[in-house]
Amino acid sequence: MKTLAAVLVELNKPLTLLELEIPPLAPGQVLVEVAYSGVCHTQVGEARGRRGADKFLPHCLGHEGTGIVRECSVGVTRVKPGQRVILSWINASGLDVPGTQYRHDGRPVNAGGVTTFQSLSVVSENRLTPLPDALPLREASLIGCAVPTGFGVVFNSAQPRPGQGIAIFGAGGIGLCAVAAAHLVGCWPIVAVDIRANKLQLAKQLGASHTVDASSADPVAAVMQLCPGGIDFSVECAGRPALMKQAFACVRSQGGTAIIVGNAPFGERLDLDPRDFNQGKRLLGTWGGDNVPDRDYPRYCRLMSAGRLNLSLLLTKEYELAEINQALDDLEQGLAFRPLIRINPS
């Protein structure tokens, strides 16, 4: 059996479409026919060599999507053949199996516990979550990364109370989900910061009370004008140390909390004044929004079913698998909020 996959063969080069031979499933692995895959800035960083040396080349990419289970190996109890599933890089319960190794022309092609830029994928059981039948595969594909990270950083990491303020730096897929989550919680104000007008406009649609165009205004000064003394929470979603510093600068003393979501390029550093910590400011990291998929993914599915979470606003542009490099470019250039790869739609 074979699968068509977009493979990172060399850093700073376009992904290559290759037909890979699928190995026999190891215990705890599941064969999934991928329906849709989201595209994340993590993949842009990997492809552009911004995550340091890559000892696994060549390898498959993609870590959020939806699909249908086609085969289960020994020991798998979480899902069954024919079941619709969410594919996610965040570990759930179930067997945790190391990545698989495909082959192309007799040579190995590596893959992690989950990859989604391909028509068929061998996935570790604990990277899969059953998807309710009523939810569309298309929109639910973002529950693999963008939704849990953006919603989780609000629901799980920050845990704001209604009426507390939050500033979100970076209005990409994750940042926009954080805006939507803050709106559901009842935060006020909700300040979205970005340099692109189209992203700020969508942030308003998703619940931002205020927006700041960082290309023409100082976001720290803007937040301080709205919230004299500083805002309760800030979230950095762009992976840029300069924005991380701004996010920390704009939270209030004695309990203000900045949370870092974005992945900075390998080797970059963050410079802070330690006196800010003496004033009671807090700086937190988060691992994918601190989600527990068994607990949190069903909650996101319920929000979708209830019409409280409209992901179609983010999915404005679809691509075929053969257009994967265009999708990466468009995401990097801000031309797509969350590119969606249509692989085996049903």
Image: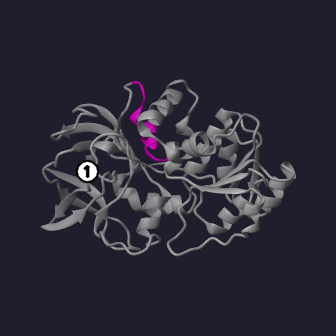
Answer with left or right where residue 196 lies relative to residue 239: right
Magenta: main secondary structure equals helix
Q: Quadrant of residue 278?
A: bottom right
Expressed as whole percent of the image width and height from the top left, the position of residue 134 reads: 41, 24
Answer with left or right where residue 319 lies relative to residue 254: left
User: Is residue 183 visible to the viewer in this orientation of the structure?
Assistant: yes
| Magenta part of the chain | 134-146
Q: Which residue is at 28% across, 34% downward?
A: 78
Q: Which residue is at 76% across, 67% downward?
A: 275
Q: Is residue 266 magenta?
A: no
Q: Nearer the viewer, residue 184 or 194?
A: 184
Q: Amino acid at mark 1?
A: Val
Expressed as whole percent of the image width and height from the top left, the position of residue 146 reads: 50, 47
Q: Residues within 10 Å of mark 1 (few under 14, many from 20)?
A: some
Q: Which residue is mark 1?
A: 97
Q: Nearer the viewer, residue 308 or 321?
A: 308
Image: 129 above or below 336: above
Expressed as whole percent of the image width and height from the top left, the position of residue 3 reads: 21, 52
User: Is residue 346 visible to the viewer in this orientation of the structure?
Assistant: no
Answer with left or right where residue 333 lies relative to residue 184: left
Image: 280 above or below 180: below
Number of marks in picture: 1
Say which element carries label 1. Answer: loop
What colour scheme does the image use? one colour
Image: 196 above or below 127: below
Q: Which residue is at 26% across, 56% downward?
A: 99
Expressed as whole percent of the image width and height from the top left, the position of residue 277 reads: 72, 62
Answer with left or right where residue 182 lies relative to residue 189: left
Q: Quarter of the image containing the C terminus?
A: top left
